[in-house]
Image (tube, grey):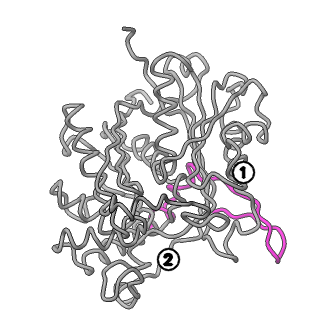
Amino acid sequence: MAELKDAVYVDGVRVPIGRARPDGYYANTRADDLVVRTIRALLARNPALDPAAIDDNVWAATTQTGDQGLTIGRTSAILAGLPRSVPGYAVDRMCAGALTTITNAANAIRTGAQRLVIAGGVEHMGHHPMGDGADPNPRFLAEQLVDTSALVMGATAENLHDAHPEITRDRADAYALQSQERTAKAQAEGVFDSHVVRMSTWSDQGWRVVTTDEHPRPGTTLDDLAGLKTPFRPGGRVTAGNSAGLNDGAGCVLLADRSAAEELGLPATMRLVDYTVVGVDPETMGWGPVPATERLLARTGLSIDDLDVIEMNEAFAVQCVAFHDHFGLPLDSPKVNPYGGAIAVGHPLAMSGARLTQQLAHYLSTHDAARYGMTTLCVGLGMGCSVLWERISDA
């Protein structure tokens, strides 16, 4: 059996994340145009790369219909002006969409089947609300394959609170406030400037150029969070303030065979070491990152202490607090989401894995002492995904 090659991260970009509402950034912008913008920006940032050398264009979307359907990996390649020789395909693993396009691309590279791949994710939740057009088989409920709450993500977060009563609403709100504060700090320090690209949008007021994420609320206080309603359960603990938002966005990364990157003079920031995807009870889908990370650490012989940085998607604060508690990490651990997370910046479902990977690459490229980083998230209908990366020391 041939030895696996190194799949390395070269670069990544995303558009500013918008709010999925009638007056949001992208209310009048097509999802596939968000994708095209990121592909073109990625190529513009890497002029030494011949687009004809790209072996595949892999994109994820959770709701694969309308302006983010029609095999968006192939259609976006054509729309972005890539050579007709560049193929593409679409992936759906819900919130782990972009992480799955990245691991799929890395696998193709590691086995030698491909050398250069664009992998990304898009979600326009303003055009396609979660579950829009879906028709769950009645057997799910008629045969009690899942509880009714399994199909409502906020309800699954309430279930996770039930399973871990030590995770109170106060703790969840405190974590949510930390996300807002860290995101505001990262924005002020220009962290996101390394991968966020401008996007021209149209509204009733005319054209404008958006440059920063729309969702963060930097002035949030604990009193603000404490006053929010609990829409999923009377007297519950899950609110709009300690959950990720409903958002629009697109982002992608360029992965390469390490030898190809060296030949083409492309930077190599980190290499993909390994990854895991696991299933968990759909009713408590937020638990997914815990067993996914446990399996990943066991496979690689590492411990949680060996990880220098963890970029975790903040679908709900309770899911993040549960992860911290399980691995004995303080809630203010500087190595978990140092730049804040989705509670502040937003969560355009299939796109979020690209954002996590870009932020991880930024951290590893600016912290010489760091070696290992991980991206992880929970996935609807009961899954978890974790991806381990290693900084390339000469990057």
Corner quadrant of residue 303: top left
Viewer-nearest residue: 219 or 237: 237
In the rendered image, residue 188 lying in the magenta stretch gets the answer: yes
Q: Amino acid at mark 2?
A: Arg
Looking at the figure, which quarter contains the C terminus? top left
Q: Relative to 86, does residue 146 appear above or below in the rendering?
A: below
Query: Residue 20's x, y, as percent?
Result: 61, 70
In the rendered image, residue 295 lying in the magenta stretch gets the answer: no
Residue 32 is labelled as 1
Residue at 50% x, 54% y: name it: 352
Q: How many tags in the picture?
A: 2
Viewer-nearest residue: 167 or 15: 167
Query: Residue 173's x, y, as percent?
Result: 32, 78
Specify few, some or many for label 1: CA neighbours under 10 Å numbering under 14, 14-19, or 20 or more. Answer: many
To which residue does mark 2 refer?
A: 217
Q: Secondary structure at mark 1?
A: helix
Residue at 50% x, 77% y: name it: 217
Alpha-carbon distance for marks 1 and 2? 27 Å
Residue that extends furthest to the top in the rendered view of this protein: 1
Along the horizontal axis of the image, is 381 left or right of 159?
A: right
- Contact? badges 1 and 2 (CB < 8 Å): no
Q: Secondary structure at mark 2?
A: loop
Q: Amino acid at mark 1?
A: Asp
Specify few, some or many for label 2: CA neighbours under 10 Å numbering under 14, 14-19, or 20 or more. Answer: some
Residue numbers of the magenta segment: 185-211
Looking at the figure, which quarter contains the N terminus? top left
